[in-house]
Amino acid sequence: MKAFGIVKSLILSIFIISASLYLCAEPVWQPVFLKTPAMKAAGMAGGEAGQYQTCMERSLSNPDILLTGIDVGGVVKSADNGKTWFFPKLEGLRAGAVSSVAFNPKDANIIYAYGHHVNYKEESLEGFYRSTDGGNNWELTLDLTEKIEKKAEKPRIYYQHHQIEVEEKTGTIYFGSWVTGLFKSKKGGVAGSWEKKGLEGKYIRHVKLDPFAPNKLLVGTDEGEIWKSIDGGDKWWKIFPAAGKKIEDPGKKKYGPGGRAAIGSLKFDPLIKNLVYLVIENSGLFKSTDGGETFEIFANRSKAFLFDVSPLDSNYMYLMTHDKDAYFSHDGGKEWKPAEVNAKLQFIREGWIGNPSTGMSPDPRDKNKACISIGTRIYRTKDGGENWNPSGEGNPGFNYGWSAPSTNHYFDPVDPKRAWTFNLDFGTVMTEDGWDTAFCYSHGDTKWKDGTWSWGSCLYGGVIVKEKAKERWVVLGGKYFRNTIYLSEDKGKTWHFVEGEGKFPIELGYAEAILQHPGNQNIIYCSNLISRDGGRTWQKMSDGQYRVLGVFKKNGDIIYSVKGEKKKSRSIYKSIDQGATWVELPLPPLVKGSLIGYHWHGTAEFAVDPVLEDVFYTLNTECELFKYSPEEGWKNLIVSKGKICNGKLAVHPVRSGLVFCCSGGEGEANLFMSSDYGNTWKSLQADLPRGGKGTMVVSPHDNTLIFNGGFGMWKRNLPE
């Protein structure tokens, strides 16, 4: 018995020590997956690629592993043949967008990506990226940032690209860039191994090696050209369109100027020598039986967009159109049958298929299986393309308004399980059960006074006004730089805009934020306007020149603003009477030409301490973070590397001095917290993917920090 007691005490001690270690462990981030009640009832775990995929590739050495590129940066990975998806760590992938990915043919952990510099992500870098650990850590081995910015003259298209081709036996890489030409590496794409191989000035979209002739290359461009090389890229000649010839689509619209002429797909048949398939966007599917020298119409689908063929059986083919129609053939294209795309179990606009197809990957082990990305979604087929079903589980890629102020997330003040997000590109999302399930609401487009249309799903923030059993949703949105105010009186089922001049939508430009009085829910501030009846009607504050950035939580009559045109303001103003009168605060010590209260493209970054009056934080256009207090005046805060380019700010809703800052740097730890008013900072990144900036907000009901970014919604507990 004594021995048993000793053993029992030892086991109990081990349990206590283990529990203590667990309780003391650093909290980690958890993704919040989106699912409707119907998805939950079907047993789906949730998750959907809310941002646009740009491409899809599969590992040859381990076909269960797939990658897609994302138009707002990063890559998403599947390790189970497309059933579920996740973000790798992405350390070092400093790309504002990824348009093409590829695998080393002998090692699935060696991954390549074409990352882009994007003007609204100042620190993003363009070029060829390489990872040797499955996408967790990346190195930029060919930097094209400066060259691209000087030469690119038109908007880029980040979808449906195959710009990286790897020779299966030798691992030689061919990389087709935008306007800077084609590059070749015989050493696995390591830094210093690149040779330039011509085609400078071309917008390269597809690079394909002939499986029967390893030195033969075909390159398709966004201009609708095909270039050929038979010596590994040393010499090139244009083979399509042939001199003096034009292609006519089934609708009798001439191929060429005046319409999209881009090469949508370019594919060698993997089993039949010299057979090449070509999709010219909006012109149809063509084929060549002489290695690409001449082409003839193969499928009369004028909106053809994406094509692929099984590597096991050339009779199994897949074709997607710009109108999101899907077709399949099991007899080598002699007969095309319409496919069924199941959009019923989707989160974003349930029943809506999505945008055009962006990437496809037939399974090399089973001719009946394939994966496809269609805009925001991923689908799989198990019957050769006859039926496609959703397969985006585990993907937290929904864009929760990374460009919007922190007012894009609203918590019900009473019920901790109810919350809303107001999202750039994807409308309003609302949960009533703590994100176990959620609903997505589209606002519809609105006609402006000048005859153009708003984009109802482009939102920057919102507040909720409760009136007995009813509630009003008051939402700011419209277009990226042209906002209006939408109202819903029936919980998102129907919407109408706030009328301005001539019964057209009220126009606010880039309104920065919509903020609710903490002591009176019916008082709402938005840009230079105030509403005192819960958003129904609005009036200008003072002379209409002051645009509100922040509200003091202990007294909602105290608000802070900038004045004048948004690109000319340098001062912060304070009002203690809901914007009736204003007092200018001391001018901050800015560098010449910088603007306070704004980052690069005008979004207000301003956070007010919840307890101390006149203590607030703001960014300027030179990526500097400042704190203002009556005792110290303006103080430049150093968070990391001294710059917070294109960043975001937030404060704890209750605790004074607790500040959060997120820089805009993709590919690096960029989320920080200070518990001493910004004097010292520590990283909160932990295992959160290095996917770039996002907005932060702390739940007023508990100590949960929410991060909303271009790679989804994530949450973690904060230390007490």
Image (cartoon, rainbow, N blue to C red):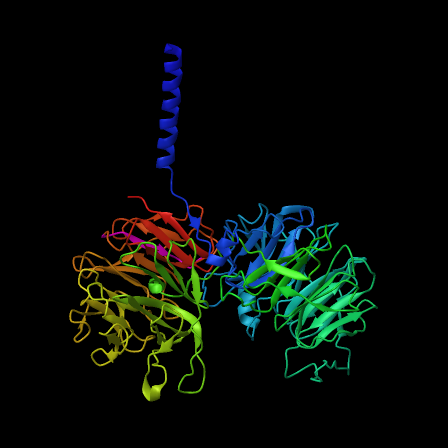
| Residue 556: image location, x then y, percent | 20, 65
Please provide the residue range marked out in magenta. 656-665
Residue nearest the observer in this picture, 34 or 190: 34
| Residue 626: image location, x then y, percent | 28, 60
| Residue 309: image location, x then y, percent | 73, 61
On the question of residue 35 being in view, the answer is: no
Vertical arrangement, residue 300 with respect to residue 384, above or below: below
Residue nearest the observer in this picture, 470 or 287: 470
| Residue 82: image location, x then y, percent | 61, 53
Horizontal placement of 714 versus 82: left or right?
A: left
On the question of residue 585 being in view, the answer is: yes
Horizontal placement of 218 versus 678: left or right?
A: right
Residue at x 22% of width, y 77% of height:
541
Residue 586 lies within the magenta run: no
Residue nearest the observer in this picture, 668 or 481: 481
Which image quarter is the C terminus in?
top left
Majority SS type along the magenta span: loop
Residue at the top extreme of this rendering: 2
Residue at x 38% of width, y 48% of height:
716
Vertical arrangement, residue 704 with respect to residue 310, above or below: above
Residue 659 lies within the magenta run: yes
Which image quarter is the N terminus in?
top left
